[in-house]
Amino acid sequence: GIQTYFCDVGVPTFTPPELQGKALRGLTRTSNHDRFGLAVMIFLLLCMGRHPFAGRYLDSGEMPIEQAIQDFRYAYSKSAESHRMAPPPGTLPVQNLPTEIQELFESSFRKSGVARDGRPSAKEWIEALRKMNAATVRCTNVKSHYFIRPPSLTCPWCSLKNRNGVDYFPPPPPVQPPPPPPPPVFDLAEAWKNIEAVKRPDSVHGIPGSTTTKPQPHPEALEASDRWRIRQTEERKNALKWFGIGLVLAFPTYALYEWGGITLLCIIGYLAYITVRKVKYDDDDSEALRTIYQNKLKSAENAYARITGQWNSLARSEPFQEMLEELKRQKEEYQKIPKLKKDRYEKLKSRIRVDQYGQYLRQNKLTPGMIRGIGDSRIATLRSHGIESAYDISDEAIRGINGFGDTLVNSLLEWRKQVERRFPSVPTRPFTPAERESVEREFRTREQNIKEKLIDGPQRLEKVRNEIETSRTNVKPKLVEAKRDLAQARANFEAF
């Protein structure tokens, strides 16, 4: 006859509500029982390992997963709030899955699923998942993100990343381009020798165009200066003469009125002086010519100062010296590259150690029975809050979870410390080829840039020197002319 083999064990988090808390020895399982476990497994696959019954219990106390299953408290159900449950924070909303998939989960986890064949079969799941796969699209922002449209209009993985700061599907690292061909052999001493061999711009001392011969004033200036001096002498004489006339005229008044006479004396003398001066010198332009020569002197001084400034800048050869100093700095930087590269490798080694530490903590996964008081149900609860390894354990992350009091929190923290104490025995991994190539390429590029500047240094210095000497050639005649114009303008004005 037919021999029946019973399964006497089961995993509580995959056991349907109608079998929770029952002895499984000798119990006949049905396909409908297995369909519950199938739905749980599909939920774990589609929802980042979250258990459908591991959620936030909205009342006080603790809600183990086994009890939530027995009470049909599906945390992601449309009616989850009526069961006093809610999805844990930071999870993918089930509404991002197709409506048909959502309904299959509802059918699998509600009370009506207990009836014979009340839960979806594997065939129904296959058909729904095929449709979901056909509706999967790629995110336009992150190429490694895929989601179902509809119902989602935007990428839910991008939303989770922006909200939680974690990218569950990060893009692969960029493909590194092939290294450039090796540069030609470079001799630093030879390159610097060629730079120092470039002839400096000729030294310039003093201002060109200087002369010891003082120019003679223009005849017009001499003639005007003679008239101007004669005029100044006559004006002083006339002023004294008319002052005397005024004194004689005002004396009788002074005898009577004292200060009134003195005032009248001054007024009469000044009016007489102005009248005679205007009549006598109206046709004399010596005063106007003196002002003109004075303005020409100021203009010549300004022009000479401006062109002298240009000449002094060229005479000091500043552009040539600045370029030479820059090449010297490039040479010194090239000599420091070996030490800079060594320092970069040390920093990379430190970063690798930090990354290795994080990876080591992530590898130490939480498993049932590893820590006293933490079994399957509590492990599932921790995972629903994103706590899966020693890396995820912290007082802040655990303290707010329902059912985890001081004793469990301290046990978890102590376990992490034990894991941390074993880390120093882990050897630091060597550099990967990609990491080593990244450092080598950086300094190879740096070296090549400096080499090109030092190799081109002599040609660039010669170009600057030629520009300086050409500018000097162009400025020198202007400077000589400005010097001559200034001397002539000074001689014309000093004639007065």
Image: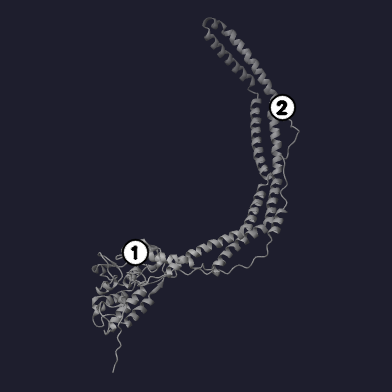
- Residue drawn at x 65%, y 35% as measured from the top left: 301
Q: Residues within 10 Å of mark 2 (few under 14, many from 20)?
A: some
* Vertical placement of residue 401 versus 314, above or below: below
Residue 64 appears anywhere in the view: yes
Decide which of tag 2 and tag 1 comes sooner along the chain.
2
Q: Nearer the viewer, residue 137 or 376?
A: 376
- Residue drawn at x 48%, y 67% as measured from the top left: 425
Number of labels in the image equals 2
Mark 2 residue element: helix
Identity, as a three-letter code, of the amino acid under mark 1:
Val
- The label on residue 222 is 2
* Vertical placement of residue 41 versus 227, above or below: below
What colour scheme has been applied to the protein in the rendered image? one colour
Q: Residues within 10 Å of mark 1 (few under 14, many from 20)?
A: some
Identity, as a three-letter code, of the amino acid under mark 2:
Leu
**If the image is split into quadrants, where does the N terminus sit?**
bottom left
Judged left or right of residue 107, residue 46 is right
Task: State which quadrant residue 495 falls in.
Answer: top right
Judged left or right of residue 453, residue 132 is left
Choose mark 2 or mark 1, whichever is in front.
1
Q: Are marks 2 and 1 in contact (CB under 8 Å)?
A: no
Judged left or right of residue 330, residue 155 is left
Pointer 1: what residue? 409
Residue 490 position in % (x across, y down): 69, 31
Distance from Cα at disc 2 to Cα at disc 1? 109 Å
**If the image is split into quadrants, where does the C terminus sit?**
top right
Residue 111 position in % (x across, y down): 23, 76
Residue 166 appears anywhere in the view: no
* Vertical placement of residue 338 versus 80, above or below: above
Residue 333 position in % (x across, y down): 62, 56
